[in-house]
Image (cartoon, coloured by chain):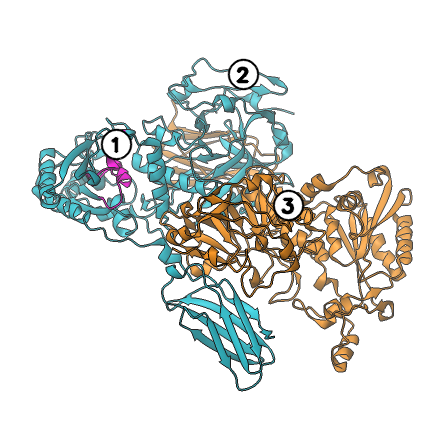
Chain colours: A cyan, B orange
Amino acid sequence: MTSRHYRRPGPGLAPGRTPTPSEASIRYTRIVQGACLFLTLTAGWLSHLFSVYLTQEQSEAPTVDVSSLVSSVWCHTGSSGEKLCKFRNICYDPWFQEFQFTMSEESIVFGIRNPEQWKDIDMSTVLDHNAFKMKVSIMSPENKIKQNRAQVLMDPTFIIHRFKPDNIMHVIHDELIPLLFTMESVSEKDFDGKQFSLAFTDDHNISTLDKWYDHFSKSPIIKLPYISETICFANAYVGMHKSTLWFDYGFKKYHGPYINRNFHVNGLKKFVKYSLSVWKSKPIFTCSLETQCVKVVVVSREQSRRILNLKTLYSAIEEAHQKSYKSYGLEIVTIDLARHDISFVLTELNQATLVVGMHGAAMILSLFMPPSSAIVELFPYAINPDNVSFLKALFQQREVYPLYYEFWRNKNIGDSRPGTHADPLMGKISHLSEELQNIIMSMTEVPPVQCCHSPAYLYYMYHDTYVQESVEQPILNALLRTQSHSPHPSLLSKHIFPASPSFLNCTFEGQELSVAWGESSNPEENENLWFQLTMLNDDIIKVVNATDSLSREFWMKLSTPIKSFQLWFQPFSGKDRSGHLTHQNCTKSR
Amino acid sequence: MTSRHYRRPGPGLAPGRTPTPSEASIRYTRIVQGACLFLTLTAGWLSHLFSVYLTQEQSEAPTVDVSSLVSSVWCHTGSSGEKLCKFRNICYDPWFQEFQFTMSEESIVFGIRNPEQWKDIDMSTVLDHNAFKMKVSIMSPENKIKQNRAQVLMDPTFIIHRFKPDNIMHVIHDELIPLLFTMESVSEKDFDGKQFSLAFTDDHNISTLDKWYDHFSKSPIIKLPYISETICFANAYVGMHKSTLWFDYGFKKYHGPYINRNFHVNGLKKFVKYSLSVWKSKPIFTCSLETQCVKVVVVSREQSRRILNLKTLYSAIEEAHQKSYKSYGLEIVTIDLARHDISFVLTELNQATLVVGMHGAAMILSLFMPPSSAIVELFPYAINPDNVSFLKALFQQREVYPLYYEFWRNKNIGDSRPGTHADPLMGKISHLSEELQNIIMSMTEVPPVQCCHSPAYLYYMYHDTYVQESVEQPILNALLRTQSHSPHPSLLSKHIFPASPSFLNCTFEGQELSVAWGESSNPEENENLWFQLTMLNDDIIKVVNATDSLSREFWMKLSTPIKSFQLWFQPFSGKDRSGHLTHQNCTKSR
């Protein structure tokens, strides 16, 4: 019997795969062979720099004989067809960079029917992108025996592959909201950040945004590409709900709004509520509508897609304030994610009446504004909000999020300045043919694009902008809308139906039949309540609609004596909202 | 503001609904109004007789202001289309005999899209029976406020409606196996009976079989029809997987095998394993094949469908034993569920080589026999096993359960004796017209029937039987089959596919390209392993199949120098089992 681990060229490094600089320094090694246990921490351990370590709690996780583990899996399907899987006893082998499923005759494999479906488990929510499938190897317990021992983590753990963890919009849209929504769907209590651990299969570098993820993991996050010995998860969840997605990055189709038929806006609200509970600090001085003060947050970009005349923007805000909230104070706060900490940013946004900013990832944070506040999103020349704005997609298309949205486009090429970046991905076009450069430069609007390398799109998207005075109009409109509290559609009205009566009593005697029923528990929620009584007297069916919802009884005399009598009873609200159908065999009156 | 509770005619009794004698005695009352708390236990409290009480733990459950509760629900769909729902903060109101869902704008309602779907949540697994739908009333938080306070149970609780809890076949097939399968699918560890509580909405009388359910509930089972004050469940599961069902009782179609396309036989095995761990006692004297002894268990029925000449049956068993296991001992044990306790019955069955018995509910316990043992099921005159036998449906149709099945039919009307029961549901036909009686009595085989009142079916099903010597043949066949250990289909072979290589390395130089790849983790499980390499050299695609699974490298010289080169790599097993497709951008050799 051979052990593959003996044949490793080095701890956790596969030949043909170049270690990144971070790998070289942060690798920790735990070598356990047979009954003999070594615990080796490499000298390069820099736990303060990276979250790639196991907690004290986890490092005390049992090191068990892996051959005794039998894997099982249960997958369900989410509302967009995504697989949501729960694994028991699945291991990650860093040598093969794969998950290993030990299949014995005792395994339960639910919701995966064939090898093709095994290869179709998404570790990311990004739509139509095939690079984030879970890589699983199925093996027999006899094969697994050769693997000696491994650590087993008992904590239920969500394992995901992040898409763009250095971009706050992607972090929130692609991972944090879907994670919270999925965690709540399997958790036995309201999400409090203490139910699950997190593990990543991506090998993205660390970013200042990593701390957002930390609040979704009860213990330090495990980065699987950097572990050196097999880890087994007693309970792992793979796959996230796509019900909270509203934007499509344009793989195989155009970048733009995702028409999500089963969109769950409450997933966004739960995320906001949870994040505020985690991040929000007590503000020292509060300016909000409650204190007769209008707070306007300007989201600033200092590296690219800049506003070159911020003063004009501030003046426009002041003018609009004078025309809408004259008797209120005004506070303009400029925030920049690169400079301000999350706590400050979220606290400010959570009191703001208005957010103004150039289109960009940071604008996703307007989710944290209080209900009935407003957003004005600014766009560089030739960029159409309908194609690129994840905010417009959410706030206008859906009409379910209680914020008001306005936008302003730079329509004047003279107010637009190309960026100065040397990277085609940051809008450089000088490496293209002159003809192509001319075509791009003569455009007045960039058409919808697929992800991710359209030079025209990137060129204009990275232009800086001089805003014009015309920006005042959408700002004023936005402020005025915050003064009208238009109702937004109710979940209750979509689902409500009349409840059944507390009792149903039917009797007959001679030619007379009578029916009485009790009150129901939700008459206030149902307008135009009425009841349908279907009576079967031997072979004769009579259908009666009782429309006086208060009387709750019905009496009838037939032309012939009644021998037997059955009743079906159903409450209705309005034209076609019906409650449960109740059946009763009626008795002869005493 | 009125409280409905003041208007109750009596604690928990709705007008028009007659209390059963058990209700009158066992009702317990907990009245909590406003901030004032009374704890009243009625004098008729007989906790030793009924499991309708709350444990100490549960009676200390918080009594909270119900108006603060917001409900949520997540429903998934099982493989037969059944809804599997998890509720947060759902209350049962005994006055309205309904579940109450408090819907605020914060509620999450996932997997239920409209009022019709709210009315279609099954509380039972019985196929095509519409009487066990969950009765839900949706209400606004404003309405809920009127309800004052209620107990909140924090334990995750499965709420089910039992179908026939006095029949062991129904208990196991309809509830216990589906419950365990569903509990495992949502639990964070292997099922040990301590994860979940149970609550019933049915009002069936207590039965000797109730103790089977007790092992599926961490705390005493709550019978909702008998509670007197609202109980709220912080976490409730409603709906059970139908993946383990194999028999259809014939509502809307014929009684008979259920062709379950996604049958999960491992759900049955887990149930057997768990039940044995709970019930099995240490046998004092063991007779089993390991101790060179053939144990034959005869399942006896003493009230109906009796064998009138058991001696003939015993002789046939002895004869068959002489012809198959002559050198082994023989022990014949007769068990009767009405007389023997579960522990004894399961321990005996778990050592048996053969079970023989007249068709009936108790025969379901043959699930507890060891692998490769056998069953002979006996049938009264005119009864066709294909139509009525849940054992034949399982063991013959599926060929997945590792037991052997044989049957014997009484083909001789002279050996059949009508039952003497005075109930048409127990086979009485004397109340029918003479013509109909004659038709029934002249039948030689009862055709397939729908549930549940076919007089011909019931008439013959309740006949007693004199077995003939011909019963020896199936008994001998069964014993002989236990000597051949034919393999049964493997889960692994259905799912296995070749894993990806541990690394993939491709380089080019001049006109030469070379590819090398690592070993994979499951070569032993995959026969005829080969690899497909798809190479894109500028615009030229080459596809090469590498069939020597040991060489793990490929070299090629092209007619023109290579400028760029991409590789797709996919492992295959046999003709069409493929692994993950891997893509690589190849590098220029140094």
Tell me which chain the residue with mark 2 is part of.
Answer: A
Q: Secondary structure at mark 3?
A: helix
Q: For the residues labelled 2 and 1, say whether their Cβ atoms are less than 8 Å apart.
A: no
Q: Residue at x 36, y 26 (%)?
A: A205
Q: Which residue is mark 3?
A: B266
**Amino acid at circle 1:** Val
The x and y percentages for residue A543 are: 47, 77
**Element at label 2:** loop
The answer to whether any part of residue A223 appears in the image is: yes
- The alpha-carbon separation of the residues under discs 2 and 1 comes to 43 Å
Q: Which region shows up in magenta?
A: A344-373
Q: Earlier in the sequence, mark 2 or mark 1?
A: 2
Q: Kindly identify the amino acid type of the residue bearing the numbered disc 2.
A: Leu
Residue A491, label in figure: none
Q: Position of residue B269 (x, y in %)?
A: 67, 45
Q: CA distance from mark 2 to mark 3?
A: 39 Å
What x and y, as percent, mark residue A494? Answer: 37, 57
What SS does tag 1 mark? Answer: helix
Q: Which residue is mark 2?
A: A39
* Discs 2 and 3 carry the same chain letter: no
Instruction: Using residue A354 as the reference point, say whether residue B408 is left or right of it.
Output: right
Q: Amino acid at mark 3?
A: Asn
Q: Numbered disc 3: what chain?
A: B
Residue A345 numbered mark, or none: 1
